Amino acid sequence: MPDIVKPYSVDLDLSIGTLRSFNKKVEVKLSELREFFFNREAADNIIKKHNDPAVYVYFENSHPHMRGEMNFGVTILSPGKVGCEYNMTRGHYHSRRRGEVYVGLRGEGIVVMQTKDGMFFHSPIRRGKVVYVPPSWAHRTVNTCDRKLSFFYAYASDAGHDYGTIRRKGFAKLVVEKCGKPKIIDNPRFTR
Ligand code: PAN
Ligand code: ZN
């Protein structure tokens, strides 16, 4: 990849919520997400029964990890649940103090955010909703509907992704289905 990125434009298909061109595609299967869900036995059963399904995929225009550059893309999160927890992304802190913007394109869900000193926030995400993730806030997206959830994102290329902290400590809250509706509850396993 060249060190100097020239200006360019790409098409975002707003009707189906996808990006027409990208230089990086990442598919995340349930086996890679197992530790992030509360009910790991339920995850193992789905992995066995459905041959380790992909839970989400993201298509990115990724640039050199240099100060000032930005990466942007679209994440598509499949519907479904693991136990009573809705399908979700791993969630991460940015390693450097860098924010991010999400724009909902299709489906409905919740973005959960937290800081290392104990603050928590959640925002709905759906078509037309813009969610601002400030620096130092971990972020995870949860698909609470029965269709695909997709959103556009943009963040600084040198942000870096820290998945280890969430893998070890979890998120303070879980988004679960209760009586057919999404509910945000305390995560009994969360450690600060
Ligand atoms: C997004 C996320 C994407 C997948 O691009 O990376 O939705 O989530 P995980 O990275 O947590 O698996 C973003 O927040 N980038 O910084
Ligand atoms: Zn991020």
Image (tube, rainbow, N blue to C red):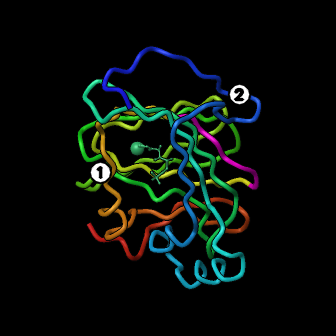
Q: Mark 2 or mark 1: which comes first in sequence?
A: 2
**Which quadrant: the N terminus?**
top left
Residue 14, label in figure: 2
Picture coordinates of residue 158 (x, y %)? 29, 36
Task: Please indicate whether residue 108 sits to the left or right of residue 70 in the image.
Answer: right
Task: Please indicate whether residue 95 sits to the left or right of residue 38 in the image.
Answer: left
Please name the residue shown 62% across and 76% down the image: 83
Q: Which residue is mark 1?
A: 115
Quadrant hosting residue 13: top right
Picture coordinates of residue 191 (x, y %)? 29, 71
Picture coordinates of residue 87 (x, y %)? 61, 61
Q: Is residue 87 magenta?
A: no
Q: Is residue 89 above or below residue 53?
A: above
Q: Read off the magenta span.
A: 146-152
Residue sitting farthest toward the front? 2
Please name the residue shown 63% across and 59% down the image: 182
CA gap between label 2 and label 1 equals: 32 Å
Please name the residue shown 69% across and 60% down the image: 181
Q: Which label sits in the foreground, 2 or 1?
A: 2
- Residue 60 versus residue 192: which sits nearer the camera? 60
